[in-house]
Each structure stands twice: as C-alpha cells, then as structure tokens.
Image (cartoon, rainbow, N blue to C red):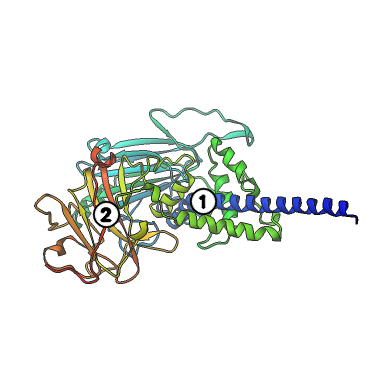
Amino acid sequence: MDRRGFLIGSAALASLAGAARAATDDLKSAARDGWVYGLPIMEMARLRAAAIGDRPGPGTPGYNSFYHSRERASPADRVMSAPEADVLYSSAWIDLSADGARIDLPPTGGRYVCFTLFDMYGNAIETIEGKEIGARGHSIEIAGPAARVGAYGYSAPVPRMPHMGPTVRAPGRWVWALARIHIERDTDLTAVHALQDGFAVRAKPKAGRPAPAAPEGAGWSDYFFALQNLIVENPPPPDEADFFQRIAPLQVGMADGFERARFADEDLPALAAGVEEGRRLVAQKRAADAAGGWVWPKADVGDYGQDFLYRAQTVLAQPGSPPASAIWSLRATGPDSALTFPSDRHWRVTLPSPPPAAGFWSLTLYEPTSEGRLFLTENPTGRHALGAWTPGLQKEADGSIEVWIGHGDPGGRHTANWLPAPASGPFALILRGYGPEFALTERRYKPTPVEALGPEPRKS
C-alpha cells in the first residue's frame, strides 16, 4: 500500500473508532437514563407485589379493597421505605381496567387524615386532607384511560359513557390509594381501627396478572425486561416521546422494544457501566436542594413531570410522597452534606418552635440501606419519632425544642427529648409537617443544622 492509501485507511479506521466510541457512550448514557427513569415504576411494582401478590383475585387484601395496618410501624416493617411512626396506613391497589372505581371515605371528625391517589410512576393524582372529609366523608370516582383502537401513535379512544359527578382521571390502569391516619397514643387504636373499617373501594376485578418488578439486585437485562413490561402496562404520557428517542440505543420503548438478544457482547460493558452510573446518580447528595443543614422539598414533589432523577430519589427513599402542600418533608444533612449521620457520637437539633402545621409534626430517625431505602431502627425504648404528642416533651424558656440524638440516654431533663440512634452504622433524620402552614412552605421556619456533640452522652 502506498503512503496515500495508508493515510486514507488510517483516517477511515480512526473515523470508525470514533463512531464506535460515540455509539458506546450513547448506549451507556441511554442505560443510565433508562435505569433512573424506570426506578420509580419498579419500586411501585415491588410494593404492589408485596401487597397483593402476583395473581390477585377477588378477596385478596389490598386488591380493589383496602388493607389496613393495625399497629404502628416498627423496625420489623421492611417493605415500604420511610414508614411514619405516627400514622396508621390504609392502602389499596386498584385495577381500573374493567370500568373505573369508586372510593368512599368515612367522616374523620377532628382526626388528621391525608388520602392520596398515585399513579405507577409515583405521581400524586389526587390528594384530600382531613378538613375535606371531616364532617360528611367523601366519595371519589376514578376513571382509567380510555381503551384505544389502532396502532400505537395512530390510535383513537373508544367512546364510552361519561362518569356521573366529579371524576379523577387516572393516566394508567393501576392506581395506589394510600391513607395516613394520625395516631397520638396506643389508646387511640380502637377509634382509628373503626375509622379504617369505613374505607371502601367499589371496583370490578378483571382477570390478569400485574406486570412484575425485577428481582431485587437484578442485572441490567432482567431490569430492563421488567421495565419494558411495566411501561406496556402503564404507558407514559405522550409528551415523554422525546425522552424515549434519546434512549433509543437501549431499545426500551413507549410501547415495546427491549430484547436482551439484540445486544452484542461488546455492548455489555457499556450497559453495565450506564446502570452503575444511574445507581450513583440516585444515591448522590442533593446539595442544590439543601439549605441550612436540611434538604427542602422541591416544588414538583408528587408531580414530577420530567424531573426523572428527583422522582427516582424521592420514590425510592419516601414512596407515597404527596405534594409538599399536604406534607412538608425535610431531610437533615450531616457532615460534608451527606444525607446520613454516623452514630459514634451524639447530636442535637434545635427546633425554634413546634413546626407550624395544621395537622401535626414529627421528627423520625431511620437507618438507611445500601439501596437508599430507610427503615426504623431497633432501640431499647421503642421510640422512633418525636412530636407534639410525645409525653413530657420539654420546651426551653423561649419556646424552642432541643432534640438529643444518640445511642445512649443523654440523662436529666434531656431524656424526654431523646431520639435513640443505633449502636453502630449511619442514621437519617426526616422532619415532617402535616398540613404545613405558610411559614413552613415559604421556608421562614428554619430548624438549626444538626449539631455534633461529644462521643459520650451529655449529662446535666
């Protein structure tokens, strides 16, 4: 080969190599973004399977009917992340494919109740709080998406009779109904149970198995295969078509597309690397949302639009999060803006006053898992949260509340405000205001950053 031919050949090889690198980078980015996009629907499918199994039928608790937690959450509850120790839950997974559904909520009196409907991507479709259902109860008609005829992208809805009265339109076949009912003390259990028993769903069951989630710790192939099936079961909104074009190298589509066999062996490292990068993104610190030692909720919590990363972070750590106007949730940041604190020393946080909320407030301690979920932690006292109902809660002369956090009892008057931490390993703190008032939603109410104290309990 002459010199001119060699140069032309080298340029062609370099061009091909560049194209190969670009294709690899595109596939890696698509795998990263696809993994992050799919995490909420995967988590919701995992929660659905834990509640109703893979073959739900009439009479299955939680399938087109309410399933009630009858006791406070405890460290033994390891299904839903960040369980709230000051509420009892009533939950239903509702299949709308037959002919919609109706939910009846009983009068709640003066007790705080927050009721939310979620789609399978973790978005809040409808939220109702205690005042709306306190005196007379409330009924909600839910309609699923209209059946369509034609090819995907060129289809039309099948005409049907409209529902009578106010109707909530769900974007997909499945919705998750979740009620939080405040409980101050165990003597409230009988009254709360009676209230739970008044929740009712009227829906026609339809034969068919819900799409399963990928097994915990599944590789990229099983993950994206399950994701594709969940997307088919719960189609994304049309305005996400551009996103699916961006992840086209992954071959996960709005209607179908993913097949493991379509990838060559040389594609596998890029796929694995993209998924790992997605995992790191979800686990990363959210410094942009942190101010004064706390991560504040973003305006789109519960209605994420195309904020896919925030949706994934929120649904993984705190599934069932309603809009911030219903429950204001702040997560404390530790050393170096981490979302956890080491338990080898003691800590203190000062609330300038009880958090301003029409319902109630609570500060809850959790232990994080490697996946990013949060669960209550074992401690000798059985106390997992502090709030206005905590017996003997101490206030300072200026009305502030000092909360003492550590494995050992701080002693003296501080014991009343002690939130026990695990003996080892990290922990996380979440401050919630139920029915938040203006001072909280406008960030005028500011708890102090969590302050590190000495390694031994501080006595007084």
Residue drawn 36% across the image and 44% down it:
322
Q: Is residue 122 above or below residue 139?
A: below
Q: Which mark is residue 36?
A: 1
* Horizontal arrangement in the rendering, residue 179 relative to residue 457 (left or right): right
Can you name the residue that lies furthest to the front here? 3
Residue drawn 62% across the image and 57% down it:
271
- Select label 2 or label 1 by which is in front: 2
Residue at numbered disc 2: 449
Q: Quadrant of the N terminus?
A: bottom right
- Element type at mark 1: helix
- N-terminal of the pair, mark 2 or mark 1, is 1
The kind of residue on which mark 2 rests is Pro
- Element type at mark 2: loop
Q: Is residue 357 above or below residue 350?
A: above
Q: Percent from the top left, x then y, of residue 55? A: 51, 55
Along the viewing direction, whichever of 240 and 193 lies nearer the viewer: 240
> Is there any visible trace of residue 70 in the rendered image?
yes
The kind of residue on which mark 1 rests is Val
Q: Percent from the top left, x then y, of residue 243? A: 57, 41
- Dividing the picture into quadrants, the one containing residue 115 is top left
Along the viewing direction, whichever of 251 and 292 lies nearer the viewer: 292
The Cα atoms of the two marked residues, 2 and 1, are separated by 30 Å
